[in-house]
């Protein structure tokens, strides 16, 4: 019984471990070497899905900390990624509070709104309060591919949820 | 209508303030905390710099350790491929050695001639202090779509200062933009924020600007200047930081610059501590 409980805990911690690992390691979702414009923000897909489906797996404090680590590794001012992730949590929680049944289409649409708010805040802060220049074209490509890839990861995460965590929403 | 407005405000408030269960902190409190940390980091550098430096050193080392598995597999596959191509490579290298042996005499002659000419001109050889360089290992090379930078394992303890030029095999790769006690961040030449004064083969001056892609571009060229393919680009040293004549790359058919060193393939770099004008850093 205890063994099953430990395994269950590991499965539950999976998405959070993946988020921390993506933030702290060299692993990135920037595929410019394969296709010049192909970059995506995998972290926000991960956060949005789990906040929407099983918020108890993705605690706000952990996401905040992961954002701080991401800022250190990427060289951004501290707090900016956390802020961006928190906006994703906010929109995700709001959608969760307002909706009873969600489909992939509704999740996709609301993710788009969450991403717009999150990126708007991220790049507004970066442009107005720091000296870092960022290409608007790259932001556009990044947002497009993040949105484009969302359904694929939605299916993968949903499969993980059904198989290892339980299909029932929290 | 009022019910719908109530629903909205309840859902909105709940999303911002909800706590309990796994959520020990509300989103609103964390948003405030993130904003405070952000402004402290951007504007309160005197207070936050030592803390940020310590945090950077710790996180960079953890990142290096966490990335070990991802580094192992590409290295192993490279080793296997290298082993399989050993014979072919041996033949190629033999041919290269023969070629370079024949060139060596010419080089020796040219070096002597160059030194003699410098004596005549009473100039100093600009690379006389080449010994004062620091070899550093690339700790983290996380590819970001927005910032092109690497983290090296040497910092202020090794004498590295912000702005110092970073080279690999004497080719310029970037400059130091952030220093910590045990590590530093190097802004690569292809980053959108990178600007380097350069000189071209024919003596024309320009600014090499990173474009965010792998190929930087030349800006502020002389009027009516036409860029051809295969023009060599060197650091002009006009900023007083980069050593004049450090090779950077050559122009391609798209009027961009192909760097001599691939910024995505850096494992060891050297930092030149002999910047000409430390006051400008």
Image: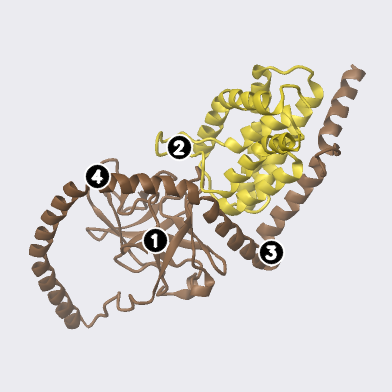
The answer to whether dots 2 and 1 both sit on one chain is no
Q: Which mark is residue B63?
A: none
Depth check, mark 3 against mark 4: the one in front is 4
Q: Which chain is yellow?
A: A
Q: Residue A135: image x %, image y %?
A: 50, 42
Q: In terms of secondary structure, where does tag 2 sit? A: loop
Instruction: Compare marks 3 and 1 and give the one earlier in the sequence.
Output: 3
Q: Which chain is brown?
A: B
**Chain letter behind tag 4:** B
Depth check, mark 4 against mark 2: the one in front is 4
Spatial distance from mark 3 to mark 1, Cα to Cα?
30 Å
Residue B142 seen in the figure = no
**Chain letter behind tag 1:** B
**Which residue is pictured at 45% across the width and 49% down the height?**
B71
Spatial distance from mark 1 to mark 4, Cα to Cα?
25 Å
On screen, residue A123 above or below B113: above
Q: Which residue is mark 2?
A: A31
Instruction: Compare marks 3 and 4 and give the one earlier in the sequence.
Output: 3
**Which residue is pictured at 88% across the width and 28% down the height?**
B10
């Amino acid at each position: 019984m205890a063994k099953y409980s430990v395994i269950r805990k590991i499965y539950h911690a999976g998405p959070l471990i993946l988020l921390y690992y993506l933030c702290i390691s060299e692993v990135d979702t920037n595929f410019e070497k394969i296709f010049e414009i192909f970059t995506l923000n995998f972290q926000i897909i991960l956060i949005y899905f789990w906040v929407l489906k099983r918020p108890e797996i993705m605690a706000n404090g952990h996401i905040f900390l992961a954002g701080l680590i991401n800022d250190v590794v990427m060289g951004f001012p501290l707090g900016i990624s956390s802020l961006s992730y928190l906006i994703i949590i906010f929109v995700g929680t709001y959608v969760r509070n307002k909706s009873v049944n969600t489909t992939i289409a509704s999740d996709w649409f609301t993710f788009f709104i969450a991403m717009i708010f999150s990126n708007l805040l991220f790049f507004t802060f970066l442009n107005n309060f720091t000296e870092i220049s960022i290409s608007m074209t790259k932001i556009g490509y990044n947002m497009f591919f993040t949105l484009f890839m969302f359904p694929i990861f939605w299916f993968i995460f949903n499969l993980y949820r059904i198989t290892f965590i339980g299909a029932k929403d929290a | 209508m009022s019910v719908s407005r109530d629903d909205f405000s309840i859902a909105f408030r709940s999303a911002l303030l909800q706590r309990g269960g796994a959520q020990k902190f509300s989103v609103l409190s964390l948003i405030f905390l993130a904003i405070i940390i952000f402004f402290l980091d951007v504007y309160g550098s005197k207070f936050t710099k030592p803390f940020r430096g310590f945090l950077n050193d710790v996180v960079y080392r953890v990142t290096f350790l966490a990335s070990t598995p991802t580094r192992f597999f590409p290295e192993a596959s490279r080793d296997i491929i290298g082993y399989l191509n050993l014979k072919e490579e041996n033949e190629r290298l033999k041919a290269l050695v023969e070629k370079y042996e024949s060139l060596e005499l010419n080089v020796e002659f040219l070096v002597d001639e160059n030194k003699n000419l410098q004596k005549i001109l009473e100039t100093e050889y600009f690379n006389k202090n080449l010994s004062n360089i620091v070899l550093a290992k690339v700790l983290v090379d996380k590819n970001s779509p927005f910032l092109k930078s690497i983290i090296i394992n040497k910092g202020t303890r090794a004498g590295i200062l912000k702005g110092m030029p970073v080279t690999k095999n004497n080719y310029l790769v970037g400059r130091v933009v952030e220093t910590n006690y045990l590590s530093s961040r190097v802004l690569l030449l292809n980053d959108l924020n990178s600007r380097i004064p350069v000189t071209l083969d024919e003596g024309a001056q320009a600014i090499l600007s990173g474009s965010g892609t792998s190929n930087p571009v030349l800006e502020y060229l002389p009027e009516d200047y036409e860029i051809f393919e295969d023009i060599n680009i060197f650091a002009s040293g006009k900023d007083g930081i980069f050593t004049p004549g450090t090779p950077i790359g050559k122009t391609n058919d798209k009027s961009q610059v192909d760097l001599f060193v691939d910024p995505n393939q850096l494992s060891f770099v050297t930092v030149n501590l002999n910047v000409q004008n430390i006051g400008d850093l």
